Image (cartoon, rainbow, N blue to C red):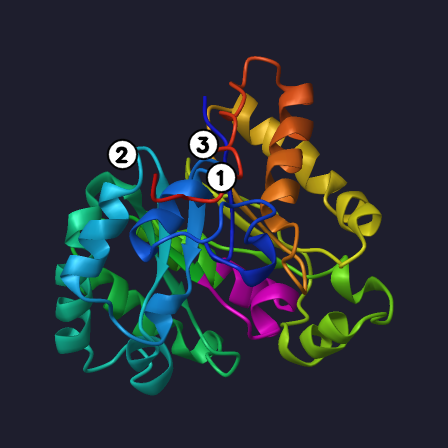
């Protein structure tokens, strides 16, 4: 029984010297983050496919059960919209191969303009992907959440490919107006879609956006504590990513979420203690 938790990145300026040792060489940053959380979103792969050697260094810094949820390059999902994308997909799959089992899922985040009419394109794309990976799809077009036929069509398409539907829960964030610069920036950029909490596979993935106020973040995730606890009891192995607009305390919050679920499901093993925050020295 495993619940993996993580953040949107493994390095953040506000964590340096407070949550993670500072300074840290690049080849040590992920290792220190991985002592706090056992999963991470691979958002940087959306902008550029990393060098295979870089990915090999990620594998070297993490245990085999660490989970990367890697976003497909935007050239595949946003520019070519899942068509004529064989070459960039080949390059991406080759680059991430060193992760082995750590590549928990390849994350297909689709633009808001990708509508129910485009689902056949998604179906064809999924059918062409190698069965050696798991796949997870995030949609943002409102119809997928409000039109029962569109919801059912997408669920059937994903189920046929053994792929998961990734909810990005922003409902707590949009429940009241922003109160900080970070929240005001996120207010204009984050998707505003209805809550979805149905898992399609045995490895559901959740992205949750809270507020910069810790109390409100924790209040907003209580429904997920219940849902994730139920998933664990059903034999599922979920991964939950905790976001806030500034992400200043995201690793702490991710561990707190894990603790709250563990209070409901005592047989869930505790996370290991993080590496102590001590600056590296030459002697």
What residue is shown with label 3? 237
Q: Is residue 106 left or right of residue 150?
A: left
* Residue at the spot 53% in from the left edge and 26% down from the top edge: 232
Decide if residue 239 is in sight here. Answer: yes
Q: Residue furthest front?
A: 283
Q: Which residue is mark 2?
A: 64
Dividing the picture into quadrants, the one containing residue 67 is: top left
The secondary element bearing badge 2 is classed as loop
Dot 2 or dot 1: first in sequence order is: 1
Instruction: Report which residue position mark 1 lands on.
Output: 37
Residue at the bottom extreme, as displayed: 79
* Residue 150 falls within the magenta-colored stretch: yes
235 part of magenta stretch? no
Q: Quick one: which residue is furthest to the top in this view? A: 267
Alpha-carbon distance for marks 2 and 1? 14 Å
Region in magenta: 138-152
């Amino acid at each position: 029984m495993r619940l993996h938790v993580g953040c949107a990145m493994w390095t953040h300026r506000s964590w340096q010297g407070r949550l993670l040792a500072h300074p840290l060489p690049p080849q040590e940053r992920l290792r220190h983050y991985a002592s706090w959380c056992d999963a991470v979103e691979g958002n940087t792969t959306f902008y550029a496919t990393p060098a295979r050697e870089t990915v090999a260094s990620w594998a070297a810094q993490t245990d085999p059960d660490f989970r990367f949820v890697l976003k497909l390059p935007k050239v595949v999902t946003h520019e070519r919209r899942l068509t004529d994308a064989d070459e960039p997909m080949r390059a991406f799959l080759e680059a991430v191969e060193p992760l082995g089992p750590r590549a928990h899922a390849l994350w297909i985040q689709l633009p808001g303009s990708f509508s129910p009419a485009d689902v056949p394109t998604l179906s064809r794309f999924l059918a062409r992907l190698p069965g050696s990976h798991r796949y997870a799809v995030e949609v943002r077009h409102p119809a997928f959440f409000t039109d029962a036929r569109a919801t059912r069509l997408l669920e059937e398409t994903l189920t046929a490919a053994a792929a998961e539907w990734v909810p990005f829960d922003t409902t707590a964030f949009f429940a009241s107006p922003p109160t900080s610069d970070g929240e005001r920036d996120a207010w204009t950029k984050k998707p505003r879609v209805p809550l979805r909490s149905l898992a399609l596979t045995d490895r559901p993935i959740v992205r949750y956006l809270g507020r910069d106020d810790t109390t409100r973040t924790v209040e907003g995730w209580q429904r997920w504590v219940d849902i994730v606890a139920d998933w664990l009891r059903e034999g599922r192995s979920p991964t939950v990513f905790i976001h806030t607009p500034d992400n200043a305390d995201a690793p702490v919050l991710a561990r707190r979420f894990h603790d709250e679920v563990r209070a409901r499901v005592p047989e869930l093993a505790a996370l290991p203690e993080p590496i102590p925050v001590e600056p590296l020295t030459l002697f």
